Image: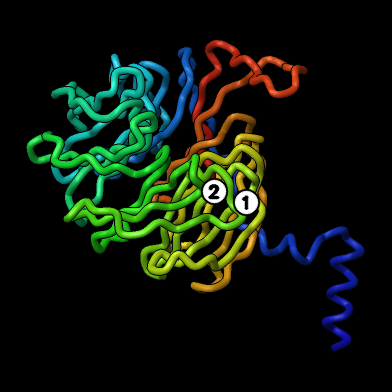
Amino acid sequence: MKKKILTMALLVATGISVNAQKKTGIHLLATHTIGSGGGWDYLSVDQKNNNLFVSHGTQVNVLNKSTGDSVGVIHNTQGVHGIAVVSSLGKGYTTNGKTATCTVFDLRNLTVMSQINVGQNPDATFYDDYSQKVYVFNGKSHDATVIDPQTDKVVATIALGGKPEAGVSDGKGKIYVNIEDTNEIVCFDSKTFSVLSRYKLLGGEEPSGLAIDKANSRLLTVCSNKVMLILDAKTGKLMAKLPIGDGADGVVFDSTTKLAFSSNGEGTITVVREVSADKFVVEETIKSEPGARTIALDTVTHHIFLPTASFEKNNVEGQRPKMISGTFKVLEFGK
């Protein structure tokens, strides 16, 4: 007992917090400068070809995810938001918000293969291994477009009853998507394309980023009122409500480390640890940079990537600061 008390006293005397020993050790590893003009939204990892796809205004910048070196550019993706990767077929899909299309491209040489007409203002997208379909969530037409990547044909359009944001799959036939303007998560069947349930987000406003722990059937959604909600994916029951930073637009869950990362536009990353299926705690807040509001996870290296830029000083309340031309970049964090 005396030895324990002495150890605690030494920690206090040297200014070391006991809680500090619980920090993840995750920090900024590299800054990958892209530099060209234009805004940004989502980014995606292509594990098979070791690439990182970064949406950027009217194009997608492609980086080697190990070195940050430029691999190429996919041009003419007007108002690009998301990038879906279908490794088994060697194809990628971008959502082009301004033209209501998806660009289909070759993952190996980045050449454009075709264009697919989808809903109005296509935003988030992802490929589901279970159903072998690409899901595109359309902000203005309030629906989801389902694409068969074998044929690149639209096989279904699903009315969602509100403005969709990010979506995820449980790997068993159910798709979940945040509905920003109704504060809920909609679940639909990946075979029948019928809506199965709608989960109201109690205490959450304008949900954007969405992640899933498939093993424990837990949905993690980040909201504009600075909270992360964790729900039981099977029932919609609220399991936890945790504080996060302001301006979150993305969240990822690492099934190996049991850590979730909320990318907050204020310039922070909230790290949440899954202690058990029923217990989640805020582990740490990591400093990033203002504007770094979306995020992608490399499931092999466990690194996370966040795009942002530098901004001019702005003293006008409620007005977005102007981006400084040529400062676009991707921040890479890890151990």
Answer above or below: position of 313 versus 164.
above
Task: Say left or right for 260 vs 89.
Answer: right
Identify the element where label 2 is drawn: strand
Instruction: Give whichever of discs 1 and 2 has the lower sequence position.
Output: 2
Figure quadrant of residue 17? bottom right
How would you rate the neighbour count of disc 2 (Cα within 10 Å): few for under 14, some for 14-19, many for 20 or more?
many
Residue occupying the point 11% across, 34% down: 153
- Mark 1 in CB contact with mark 2 (< 8 angstroms): yes
**Residue linked to disc 1:** 227
Q: Is residue 309 visible?
A: yes
Answer above or below: position of 21 versus 139.
below
Answer above or below: position of 99 versus 11.
above
Residue occupying the point 89% across, 65% down: 12
Q: Count of labels shown?
A: 2
Q: Residue 222 carries which label?
A: 2
Identify the element where label 1 is drawn: strand
Q: Which quadrant: the N terminus? A: bottom right
